[in-house]
Image: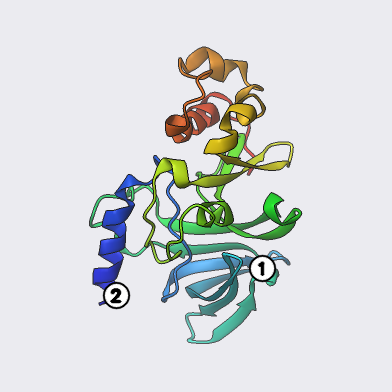
Amino acid sequence: MKLAALLAGLLLSTAAFAQYQPLGAITFWTDGYVVTLENDTIRGQVRVGSMVNDSPMGIVVRTDDNKKINLKGSQIKILAQKIPGYAYATGSIPRSRQMVIFERVANPRRNNKEMLIERLTVPGGRMVLYFDASGWKSNREITFGNFTIETLPKDLSYIVLKTDGSTMVVKRGNFDDAHETLFGDCAEFVKRYPAATRRDWSRFGDMVDAYNQSCFVAIN
């Protein structure tokens, strides 16, 4: 039953935004790890038991010796869960994407309170995209998590982190105004990417990818 529901959700998600579709925290056991605020890494089977304001709040790690460790979201700076193999069956998730990653970042929607937010871009580059679940939910009320995402580019909203440490919300409604702040600091991107100056929200994912490849100064 869980497999059928998962595959159905993935079929619906094929309309998601470019390569940066959100998947959500995984609530069943899957391989993964957490990194605590003390920089301790705990590996094993990881599942998310509860969410608060769309952020993982209750996390359980089952280690190789079958010991269960209960952690609060406030104790964690990185949460990583392996995407199960059967989730790739529909082709809506690229094989290169192996993990669902949540990182602790300042959320501009909540007075810059630090919380675990799903990271969508791969490591490296000057711009990191996180899924702004609150902004998306204000547009459409669909269950979040376990890959059951059904959405269109116009519905998605992102939290953007740049190399100076600043975060901002970017969505269809403010893309024109945010464009210069997002992409105007890299002449090489403007030179190499013909559509760099276009305010085309439907190509935002492609623009971020091209920007990070053209202006590679990694955040982490």
Q: Is residue 163 above or below residue 31?
A: above
Residue 27 visible in the current orientation: yes
Quadrant that contains the C terminus: top right
Where does the image place residue 49, in percent across and percent down from the top left? 52, 78
Q: Is residue 109 above or below residue 45?
A: above
Q: Is residue 175 left or right of residue 153?
A: right
Please report whichever mark, 1 or 2, sits nearer to the chain's N-terminal start.
2
* Tags 1 and 2 touching, CB below 8 Å: no
Which amino acid, by three-letter code, is at mark 2?
Lys
Q: Residue at x 47, y 80 (%)?
A: 64
- Alpha carbon of mark 1 to alpha carbon of mark 2: how far? 32 Å
Residue labelled with disc 2: 2
Q: What scheme was used to colour the molecule?
A: rainbow
**Quadrant housing residue 125:** top right
Q: Residue at x 48, y 46 (%)?
A: 156
Residue 86 visible in the current orientation: no
Where does the image place residue 15, in percent across and percent down from the top left? 33, 46
- The residue closer to the viewer here, 60 or 40, is 60
Residue labelled with disc 1: 40
Total marks in image: 2
Where does the image place residue 178, in percent across and percent down from the top left? 63, 31
**Quadrant housing residue 41:** bottom right
- The residue closer to the viewer here, 208 or 110, is 110
Which amino acid, by three-letter code, is at mark 1?
Asp
